[in-house]
Amino acid sequence: MKGFASDNNSGVHPEIMKALTEVNKEHAVGYGGDEVTARVEKLFQNIFGPDVAVFFVYNGTGANVVALQAMTQPFNSIICAETAHIHVDECGAPEKHTGCKILTVKSPDGKLTPQLLETHLHGFGFEHHAQPGVVSISQVTELGTLYSLDELKTLAEFVHSKGLLLHMDGARIGNAAAALGCSLKNLTTDVGVDVLSFGGTKNGLMFGEAVVFFNPDLVANVKYIRKQTTQLHSKMRFIAAQYEAYFKDELWRKNAAHANRMANLLANELELIEGVQITQKVQANSVFAIIPPYIIEPLQNKYFFYIWDEVRNEVRWMTSFDTSEEDIKSFSSELKFLLHRVN
């Protein structure tokens, strides 16, 4: 049964599965010493710029942890939105592995601005305070909103002017680039991101993410950090091969653009239903809405999804590369039926 809980719940795109099957032949040198991994590392450089370094890891939390360890010392603080994945949904892994204090910023739309960051930019050089070291943002944010290219550039310039580094959690970066009509390089290299956690699992991959370093000063110890954090995959070619298929003919963009369209279709359907209040701009592949509490459980029983804010009866609906128009229509019909039945 298809649901709207998470794009993690979708399957593997057929082209990705095909790539995994094709690479499953004979033997290859482990731990990234194979031809496929070398080829895909070059592919990342073609896409993001010749000076980037890429390190494959198992999952998104691992990508964030490896990135943040490379960017910090244990006496640093990491500043993020209060809704950020590294703060809410990673079981304290960034704090555990970096030793850093995470400082959160309240943001109504999940985005950070120079003005919002000012609250935590103090205590520099004072040994009794954790030293601000990294600003971490999500693109797409956890509230489904997007930073524009100008907003990213302004933020990066501000962060760097304060002597800090900029990390981007790009678990849904494909959705962001598709929505903004730009390249992956435009979203990262060109605006001044220092390190990117590059996600693909939510957009058709089976497993594996990549950490992309744009700042060469941060790379020297990453291979040791990745190993010590248990993120070094022995059969690396199976992660790398997926990205080769993912980048071919911009499959990533096709998948993401479809997921985004389905979210917008869902939002359009919901706007016609009395009793449903959309709470955030629908800019990528998520819809946040407040609905009557008495229909949540029966609707979940048929189309599983998560409650975002129990106090407000706010729910989150995610679409995926394999969500169909029929799925959207059926879901909307069920929602209307439940509202009508109760009323």
Image (cartoon, rainbow, N blue to C red):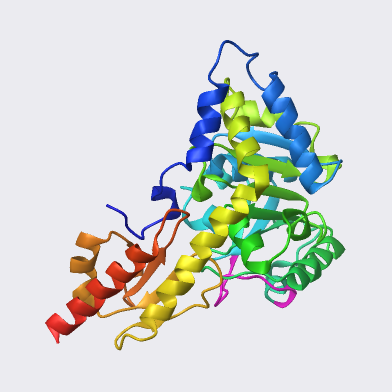
- Which of 152 and 112 lies nearest the eye of the viewer? 152
Q: Which residues are magenta?
A: 104-115
Q: Position of residue 300 (x, y in %)?
A: 24, 63
Give the left or right position of residue 83, taking residue 55 as reference.
left
Quarter of image, res 302: bottom left
- Which of 323 and 221 lies nearest the eye of the viewer? 323
Give the left or right position of residue 121, taking residue 311 as reference.
right
Query: What quarter of the picture does the C terminus occupy?
Result: bottom left
Q: Is residue 125 above or below residue 48?
A: below
Q: Position of residue 155 (x, y in %)?
A: 76, 68
Q: Position of residue 281 (x, y in %)?
A: 53, 78
* Magenta stretch: includes residue 226: no
Q: Main secondary structure of the magenta part?
A: loop
Give the left or right position of residue 29, taking residue 230 as reference.
right
Q: Is residue 152 above or below residue 245?
A: below
- Identify which residue is drawn at 71% across, 21% down: 35
Residue at the limit of the structure toward the top, as seen here: 27
* Magenta stretch: includes residue 110: yes
- Identify which residue is drawn at 55% across, 24% down: 22
- Identify which residue is drawn at 42% across, 62% down: 318
Give the left or right position of residue 91, taking residue 39 as reference.
left
Q: Position of residue 310 (x, y in %)?
A: 31, 71
**Residue 128 seen in this snapshot:** no
Q: Is residue 289 above or below residue 208?
A: below
Quarter of image, res 5: bottom left
**Residue 48 seen in this snapshot:** yes
Quarter of image, res 217: top right
